[in-house]
Image: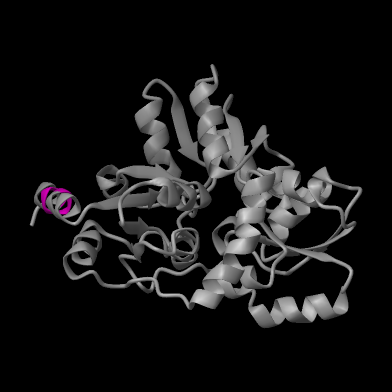
Amino acid sequence: MSIQEIQQDITRLKQEKNAVILAHYYQVPEVQDVADHVGDSFALSKLAAELPQPLIVFCGVSFMAETAKILSPGKTVLLPVAEAGCPMADMATGKDVENLKKQHPDAAVVSYVNSSTDVKVLSDICCTSSNAVKIIRSLPRQKIIFLPDKNLGSYVAEKVPEKEIILYDGFCPVHEEVMAIDVKLAREEHPGSLLVVHPECNPEVRDEADYIGSTGQMISYINQSDHDKFIVGTEMGILHPLHVSNPGKKIVSLTSNFVCPNMKKTSLQNVLESLQQMKNRIELDETVLNKARTPLMRMLALS
């Protein structure tokens, strides 16, 4: 089948089954193009809860689909590729949180939404890369356990020096591999470009940036900027929506290695099969759903 034929079948099934397709910015372009909504992980999960459709096809990785299910317990959530996971989310477990809480009983536990459901269950509140500084600054406790991402955690620690941030040694392998030398080479190749990076990058890369923000914030910054040349420091799937919205601007990836293998696992054929067979449903125990929803709702209240 051609891409156009698969897209037509997806559109037909979506209408027949009253489904909505959500795709993360890091998905391959053809999956983004067939989606009803494209965004970053938490924005999509929040949107899933607000939309009327009872069936959600979440083109992303497992923690994203689980977060959508947590916020939409009465809806059916499908993950087109069951094996699409997140190495960073897998680095921290519920047992790790329990151990940290024993070591620091006076600390609040803040988990990045890029975490497993087991971690969310034991967290006081969740955060995103866009609101992490605001969330942690608002908490009454001075000591904060932050997990799983040490890079986002260190970024928050820089912005909120009045708090003691206890970092967990987790990270996004894709962002972690990028170094200052990559910035140097990119600036030499693309002189006059502004460097825009994600806070999941390590400090030596963030220190070189002209702007630091979440995926959605980076897109808004570039869309609204009068500047015409940008180097983007995050997964290169973001280039597709940026190029569509900014045909007159030169926008390049910081490095050709900025590719998340898990985000690229989902194909149009996977989306079609998910709708056809209703496979890879996200199923979570009701008690787990309720416990994991609490830190997410606390975050929404503060946001």
The answer to whether residue 278 is left or right of residue 56 is: left
Residue 181 in view, yes or no: no
Picture quarter with the C terminus:
top right
Query: Which percent across, then down, holds residue 243?
Result: 38, 32
Foreground residue, 253 or 110?
Answer: 110
Foreground residue, 130 or 56?
Answer: 56
Query: Which percent across, then down, holds residue 28?
Result: 33, 51
Above or below residue 11? Residue 268 is below
Q: Residue at x 29, y 50 (%)?
A: 20
Q: Residue at x 56, y 69 (%)?
A: 290
Above or below residue 243? Residue 265 is below
Foreground residue, 119 or 231?
Answer: 119
Q: Residue at x 67, y 32 (%)?
A: 210
Q: Examine the structure image and report whether residue 219 is included in the region drawn in magenta.
A: no
Residues in magenta? 7-11
| Residue 192, quarter of the rendered image | top right
The answer to whether residue 204 is left or right of residue 49 is: right
Residue 208 in view, yes or no: yes
Query: Which percent across, then down, holds residue 129?
Result: 63, 48
Query: Which percent across, then down, holds residue 272?
Result: 19, 60
The furthest residue to the top = 226
Q: Main secondary structure of the magenta part?
A: helix
Which color scheme did the rendering employ for the protein? one colour
Above or below residue 90? Residue 155 is above
In the rendered picture of this protein, how many numbered marks are placed on residues? Answer: 0
